[in-house]
Image (cartoon, helix red, strand yellow):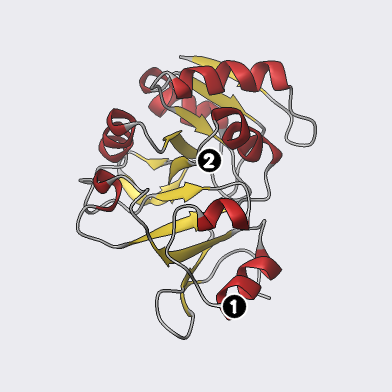
Amino acid sequence: MSTLEIREQSPDERKLRLVANDLIAGDIAICPTDTLYAFVCTLSNRSGIEKICKLVGKKPEKANLSIICSDLKHISDYTLQFSKSTYKLMNRNLPGPFTFILRANNKVPKLFLSNRKSLGIRVPNSKIAMSLVELCGEPLVSASVHHPDSTDVFLAQIEEIEKQYGHQVAWTIDAGEGGLMGSAIIDCTSEEPEIIREGPSPIL
């Protein structure tokens, strides 16, 4: 395990490329987002997805994983067609601290979906996370970093994150103290969007 200090406002691409290269090679990392720190791996990394599920204490079919995309066009590569109203809703709120649940298409690995046909999509307002997606050339699977003894207690201090999980990931990106509140979750699989969970910012 190695820790890299990377500034959110001006990320060092050389450092990010080190992380991206290992993600592409099949490793997992801990990365900041605009809400919580998250475990991440590439979407095509089957063993990485399984490892993240193990770290969050859930079987793949029960784990609430999401994927981080770069923009709305990137989202449409992995979902079935959605309505204009859903597009407008996402366009108003992304990038930002929101997870939109959409119907997945066949580009999403079956392991990720298991028996579900939908997935959570994020475009966080985070230069670090967005740069990693770009450098990896595909979406990142993500799951929030929580305390090993409680899925309701999220870890924001990098020292505690390193203590609990540093030996189980290839890289930990230190961008300072993280948040303590997850993103809002909006289910867009039906005609009317449904707010499943409130987040740190109001939905526009």
Disc 2 residue crowd, few under 14, some 14–19, many 20+, Cα 10 Å: many
**Total label count?**
2
Which residue appears farthest toward the bottom when viewing the image?
192
**Percent coordinates x, y for residue 19 in the rendering:** 55, 21
Disc 1 residue crowd, few under 14, some 14–19, many 20+, Cα 10 Å: few
Query: Which label was assigned to residue 37?
Result: 2
Q: Amino acid at mark 2?
A: Tyr
Of mark 2 and mark 1, the one earlier in the sequence is 2
Q: Residue at position x 46%, y 48% from top? A: 67
Query: Which label was assigned to residue 157?
Result: none
Between 144 and 138, the one nearer to me in the picture: 138
- Point out the image quarter for the N terminus: top left
Q: Residue 177 vs residue 198: left or right?
A: right
> Measured along the vertical axis of the image, is residue 181 above or below residue 166?
below
Q: Residue at position x 37%, y 34% from top? A: 44
Q: Quadrant of residue 119?
A: bottom left
Q: Residue at position x 29%, y 51% from top? A: 63
Q: Quadrant of residue 86?
A: bottom right
Q: Residue at position x 32%, y 36% from top? A: 49
- Report which residue position mark 1 lands on: 84
Badge 1 marks a residue whose secondary structure is: helix
Q: Amino acid at mark 1?
A: Lys
**Percent coordinates x, y for residue 112 in the rendering:** 30, 47
**Percent coordinates x, y for residue 113 in the rendering:** 28, 53
Viewer can see residue 181 = no
